[in-house]
Structure formats: structure tokens, C-alpha cells
Image (cartoon, rainbow, N blue to C red):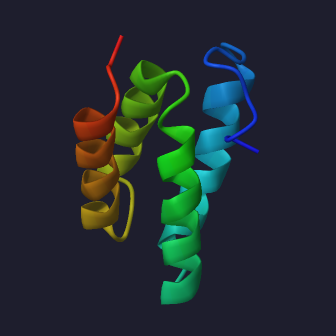
Amino acid sequence: MFDLLPEYWSSSLYPYSIKAIFIHLDDPNQAIQTAITNVLKKAARIQTKQFVEVAEECYSKHAHPILVKNLLDFAAENFAIN
């Protein structure tokens, strides 16, 4: 899905969608964590600033904050945060 979306998608649907995806990063199954991480990496290219804001919000709430930190680092290294 995130491969096909334009650079700017929606100011309300984008954060809503990635928040819903971030929830599954806490799944106890490592295969699901890996799959969700890959989806969120794709989401990071779209509206990167909003992605970072949502990820920072999720950081302290997640059971695996290192996974969120890794996504924040990935976004910072790969995309311009506007």
C-alpha cells in the first residue's frame, strides 16, 4: 500500500493508519514484528515528519521501544524530515 501512495496522502488518514499499524509492533510473535517493521519502513517515506511524530508518541508506550527507535533512526537516515 505505502509503495503506491503519493508523497502526500492525507493529513488525517495517514497518522490514523500508521498508529493502527504501530499497535502490531508489540505482537509477541517475532515474525509479525518483522513484517510490521517492514511495513512501517515503507510508510516512513510518505509524510516523514508525521511518521516521526507518531513514532515518538509510540516510543514510550510500546513494549519494545527499541523497535520504535530503530524506525526513527531509519526515517532520519533515509528520508528528509520536512
Q: Nearer the viewer, residue 29 or 57?
A: 29
* Vertical comparison of 37 with 7: above or below: below
* Vertical comparison of 26 with 22: above or below: below
Report x, y in % for residue 26.
Answer: 49, 71
Report x, y in % for residue 36.
Answer: 57, 65
* Vertical comparison of 20 with 24: above or below: above
Report x, y in % for residue 51.
Answer: 46, 32
Displayed quadrant of residue 61: bottom left
Q: Is residue 55 visible?
A: yes
Q: Is residue 74 left or right of residue 39?
A: left
Give me the residue at 61% from left, 18% from top.
7
Q: Nearer the viewer, residue 56 or 78?
A: 78
Displayed quadrant of residue 78: top left
Q: Quadrant of the C terminus?
A: top left
Report x, y in % for residue 13.
Answer: 74, 25
Q: Quadrant of the N terminus?
A: top right
Give me the residue at 50% from left, 75% from top.
33
Q: Nearer the viewer, residue 2 or 19?
A: 2
Give me the residue at 70% from left, 39% from top.
17
